[in-house]
Image (tube, grey):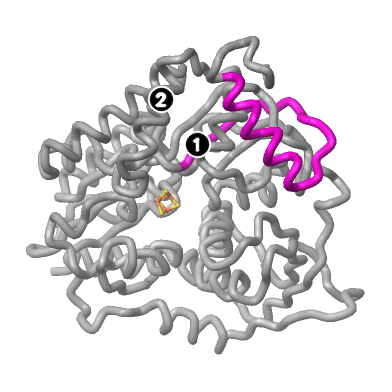
Amino acid sequence: MFNGENGWAKETSMKILVRLGELFGAERLIPIESAHIAGVSYKTLGDAPIEFLRILAERGGYVKVPTTLNPQSLDTEYLERKVPEKLRKNQKEILENFAKMGIARSLTCTPYYLGQPRIGSHVAWSESSAVVYANSVLNVHTNREGGPSSLAAAIIGKTPDHGIHREENRKPNACIKLATRLKNEMEYGAFGICVGKILQDEIPLIDGIQNASKDELKQFSAAVASDGMTNMFLMGDSTNAKSKTEITGEDIKETIESLLTASTSEPDLVFIGCPHCSSEEIQRIAAFAEGKKVHKGSELWVCTSRYVKDREKQCVKKIERSGGHVLDGVCTIVSWTEKLGIKCIMTNSAKTAHYAPTMNKATVILVSLQECLSSVYRG
Ligand code: F3S
């Protein structure tokens, strides 16, 4: 394959993987059970990669393992009607090229809801929030891949054996003591931003997380990866740790304040679903929305995968009846919110609060899910 005997697409993919392996001192490639590709939205990709994807697809690039895609820049119902034709056309071409390579339109940053990988299995994923969640919560092994390397791994069915694919590299080398009780998923996100800022690419042992739900750990995973290079964390007792960094309630409060960039309490958009909503989150939003109406002048986007949306049809109906929009396959951060005149976003996601000022040119109000709902359904 490396010498081109199996065609250009495999040769190119193999060369990407071998080069990467050499850079990180890998001695071999190991089989993977799945790949997940970030870099799907035309807004973040731009034009040059479209050409690469087109050639790869034309010259026989085809995935060897089940492969999922990150969210795109629009959904097929609500936002599709609102963005200019050229943007829609280019986004469509990106998805068509992936389809030619055997990759379905999963379009979600929570591929683990579509089918949970086997414990201890190796995968090649390139969505940072999913990478941290996979390694830490699901005990699935993946480095933080880039878009091209996860696509190359998907085509070859293998990835270089280095980093946290190797058991000896999955041990903690930093310690964080959480010295406060976190009240909700938003605070877990703020805690993630705090930890991400302190660490480089270490694996922290975190002491003090008590009875966190999977959705709270999802928020922590997304945030810790947005402000740092941490790809995995462990939870446990730090009594024997030589040194530890303590995070207090005051640290969490300061982090939340630093992420709050809006000078108004009236958002143009209330956005829930970064990372994409689980079934439980959709159910919770629907229970709150029942019998209420979205406040005039505001808008509610709930982002999730088509898979979860289809599973939660009754809840989706309740949210949409209340005036909210359940958008599948899209993410606010990589969508064209500026073109829709959205200048202020309220969210429960610390990751969104971290990126929206630069990616969406929007100010942010960071509050809990409960407060997001109370705000958008007030009156
Ligand atoms: Fe997912 Fe977009 Fe957030 S890809 S993790 S919803 S920034």
Which contiguous range is marked in magenta? 10-38
Which residue is most to the left?
Answer: 296
- Residue at point 24%, 34% (across, down): 90
Residue 111 is at least partly visible in this image: no
**Image side of residue 144 versus residue 244, left or right:** left
- With respect to residue 364, does 143 lie above or below? above
Which numbered marker is on residue 158?
Answer: none
Q: Which mark is residue 98?
A: 2
| Secondary structure under the numbered disc 1 in the rendered image | strand
Q: Position of residue 85 (x, y in %)?
A: 11, 36
Q: Is mark 1 within 8 Å of ligand 1?
A: no
- Please, which residue is most extreme toward the front here? 3
Mark 2 and 1 residues: CB-CB less than 8 Å, in contact?
yes
At horizontal 77% and vertical 66% (from top left) the residue drawn is 205
Q: Is residue 35 magenta?
A: yes
Q: Quadrant of the N terminus?
A: top right
Q: How busy is the neighbourhood of tag 1: few (under 14 within 10 Å), some, or many (20 plus)?
A: many
Residue lying at the far bottom of the rendered structure? 250
Residue type, label 1: Ile
- Decide whether residue 118 is among the magenta residues: no
Quadrant of residue 258 within the rendered picture: bottom left
Q: Residue at x 66, y 33 (%)?
A: 17
What x and y, as percent, mark residue 171?
84, 57
**The C terminus - image quarter:** bottom left
User: Quick one: 197 or 243, which is closer to the camera?
Assistant: 197
Q: Amino acid at mark 2?
A: Phe
| Above or below: residue 164 compared with residue 62 | below
In this view, the residue in front, 192 or 5, is 5
Q: Position of residue 201 (x, y in %)?
A: 69, 63
Residue under label 1: 37
